[in-house]
Amino acid sequence: MYQLEDTTYFILLAAIPLLILVFLLLMLWKNRSQKNFAHKEALKRLSPSKSGFKSILKLSIVCLALFLLVIALVNPRIGTKTEEIKREGVDVVFAIDVSKSMLAEDIAPNRLEKSKQIVNQLLNKLGGDRVGIIGYAGSAFPQLPITTDYNAARMFLSAMNTEMVSSQGTAIAEAIELSKTYFDPENPTSKVLVIISDGEDHQGNTMTISTEASNQNIKIISIAVGNTSGGPIPIKRNGILQEYMRDSNGDRVITRMEEDVLREVATKTDGLFLYGEITSEVVEEVSKFLNTLDKEAFDSVQFSEFKNHFQWFLGAALLLLFIDIFLLERKTFWLEKLNLFNEKK
């Protein structure tokens, strides 16, 4: 197995065709200038040691050296050792509320962005745990299946917004129901659902679903974002405030954080309820809670050691450049004697 450490350097390869183009234009200009100066036979008499082939050879060497230098910068790495690494963890699914009420700015920068900050910081803390992501508003939808790829989790997390679900509301029960499909029901180890929401619930059967989740050994960590005094829901375009959301009577809608449902589902599943105001405290408490749970051991084989091979390409490039320095465009006596470049007629 091999890796390319930094493929962005491949863009430098564009210099090779540019160099060839400059060379061709220069040769065209020189030929025209020489024709204006003297006839072809006269030029041969004036510069009998001039070698046309060497110009092309020098260009080829420089282009090849440049190519090798770019490969050296990219740094090909070859796996030299495989190691079986045992990893332990629990399955953690994040259910993130993406309803319009999450745009309220009663917690900075707003409830949804605060939720993303919390999940990002938790991902930094997790070790061998597998993670998944669910989004929900009036309905729940899978965003990322269970995986150990935290970079993918961050990518999908950053893309979440309030436009992902057309039906508005807060379907906490549906999010819990969907999370069951993420976990292996035959696995006795702990499973954790982290619900991040302002707590508004528009379904009503959340406690029943929570009891079913508890029977399947799913523990729920509820994180409430926002505050009880609430705030209006801004409508922005290109980051500029246009208006605040209004109800059918034209009155400004005020959304408030409601903790009762979130607290109850956490209690029902022997989980944990937290306020999301201070991110560092939330991350610390969740990490402590996860460390108390039984962890599942699973094996994964991966290349753990890679050997750099840039030095071979760098050495070859420097050798070619060294040769180019001594490869003059005029004919040389010893090369003419060897006739390597067909310089003898």
Image (tube, rainbow, N blue to C red):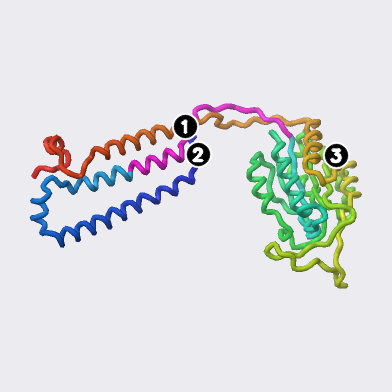
Q: Which residue is mark 2?
A: 5
Residue 317: x and y in percent read 35, 37
Name the kind of residue labelled 2 in the image. Answer: Glu
Q: Name the outermost residue toward the bottom.
A: 249
Amino acid type indicated by mark 3:
Gly
Q: CA distance from mark 1 to mark 2?
A: 9 Å
Going by the image, does 300 lie left or right of 223?
left
Q: Indicate which disc residue 17 carries.
A: none
Check contact, mark 1 vs mark 2: CB within 8 A: yes
Q: Secondary structure at mark 1?
A: strand
- The quadrant of the picture occupied by the C terminus is top left
Q: Is residue 29 above or below residue 55?
A: below
Callout 2: 10 Å neighbours few (<14), some, many (20+)?
few
Residue 34 in view here: yes
Residue 153 on image: x %, y %: 67, 45
The residue lying at 82 percent from left, 39 percent from top is 219
Residues in magenta, as a range: 64-89
Residue 139, visible in the rendered structure:
no
Q: Which residue is mark 1?
A: 308
Instruction: Tell me the quarter of the picture where residue 181 sits.
Output: top right
Residue at left offset 70%, top offset 65%: 237
What is the three-letter code of the residue carrying label 1?
Answer: Asn
